Amino acid sequence: MACSVRNERHPSRAGEGCKWEAQLEALFAKNLARLAHLRDAAALAMDVAQLLGLGVEDRERLRRAALAHDLGYAPALYQTGYHPLDGALFLASCGEDPLVVEAVLRHSRAGQGEHLPEAIRKAYAVRPPVPEAAWLVDAVTFCDWRAAGVGGRVSLGERLQDILLRHPYDTAKAERARRLVAEVRRSFAQLLHAHGLPWIVADIDNTLLAPGGELPQQVHQALQRYQDAGGCLTLASGKHPRSVLAHAHDWGLSGWQVAANGTCAVGPDARVEVLASLGAGAEALVEALSGLGLGVAVYRVDGIEPRGAWQEAYSAAFARYGELRPAGERLPGPILKILVVLHEEEAEREAKVRALAQEAKCTACRSDRQFMELLPQGCGKGTAARWILDQANWPVLATIAVGDNENDAHLFALCGLSAVVANAPAAVQATADLLLPSCHQAGVAELLKALVDGGVLAAMERFSATP
């Protein structure tokens, strides 16, 4: 995904060619999921543009190409039945920029493969590739595969898993998807390698260390070596801001850290920046969860409240794991998140908790075999990570997220690459770009060492997950 200078033979024609944007809602009135996919791809394109350092014209080209890449799925634009070709033909008829048309025509390796009908292959044969658009084709392909099919932003692995689940018997489609994911992953890794050491955003428990244990000396040394080499590292945890700040101080990490699963960021001066909180219905949700006989921990900036069927043993476990011990009194301020003590084997009660979260318009996710988290809708570790990266004026995609559980998915979706430790559940491992040794084997230390010694490409060669 290399950036090229705008070619003067193909001047930008945004004023002439973008009138089709006004038709999007009408074109996809009966397919809102596809429309969401297009809009999320266009939003992701702005992060790609930041990473590539694009100028105004190429930035706008990329935005329009990402927004238009699946236009050919609109029934009103049907000509050949092959959506990249139909979308490109429509855009050309609108007078769209030829480079944008080319990106739509060839995104996600469209036009390639013997599985295509002969008529489609002939249609592509008479349209030779435009070399000046190669970077744009690659960038749009990346945006396509990092935007979920029904809207939202995902990791490459999560997007692949979704396709495999939706087409369980189409082995040929699955194989093409695997090959393309591997290709997109390699292409992006080359770009990230050229950028230099990525910013690492790492979970704590079950990732950097075993819960209740000390940070392994090997990991501590690797953190320091990475920073000495010029790399940046941010903690991203579900823990209370005070707990995260204490870890950062003990491990020699400066700057802002992600706390309470991304509802807030905490700085070295103990300042807490609240980025999201549960609304007026949070107290009713706490009562409903308590009614299920669950131990409930309510997180606020000033501390953690024990609610529901909370037991002293839970508070002791919190303290043992390096988490702030829940206090006995009610605290002021908004509720950042709700944690419930619920083992993963209690499937029936977990289903009830997820249903309650859905009714309350909250996000539910598992952060540990013993814990579930309820967060403000759309919020996750990526919320605070983006805020921190924006403060530093660092490209959001020049990053690697490291985690181990469902609550890290939001972070994986934000960052350029994602890595999981081998002790993570298999479903989580399937969504990552890199598979590291377990936290018990200092897997994160191995990643940091590979990055310092050989860069992103060396890390990819050693830890790349097989699609």
Image (spheres, rainbow, N blue to C red):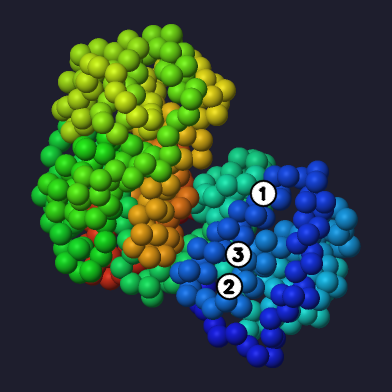
> Alpha-carbon distance for marks 1 and 3?
17 Å
Query: Of the residues under marks 1 and 3, which one precedes in the sequence?
Result: 1
Residue position for label 1 = 36
Residue position for label 2 = 59
Residue position for label 3 = 141
Percent x, y for residue 195? 38, 73
Mark 1: few, some, or many residues within 10 Å (few <14, many ≥20)?
some
> Which residue is the extreme one toward the front?
332
User: Where on the picture, by quarter, is residue 332?
Assistant: top left
- The reply to whether residue 243 is visible in this rendering is yes
408 left or right, relative to 15: left
**Amino acid type, callout 1:** Ala
**Amino acid type, callout 2:** Arg
User: Where on the picture, by quarter, is residue 9?
Assistant: bottom right
* Residue visible at 46% across and 13% down in the picture: 288
Query: Of the residues under marks 1 and 2, which one precedes in the sequence?
Result: 1
Residue in the foreground of this view, choosing between 317 and 157: 317
Mark carried by residue 191 = none
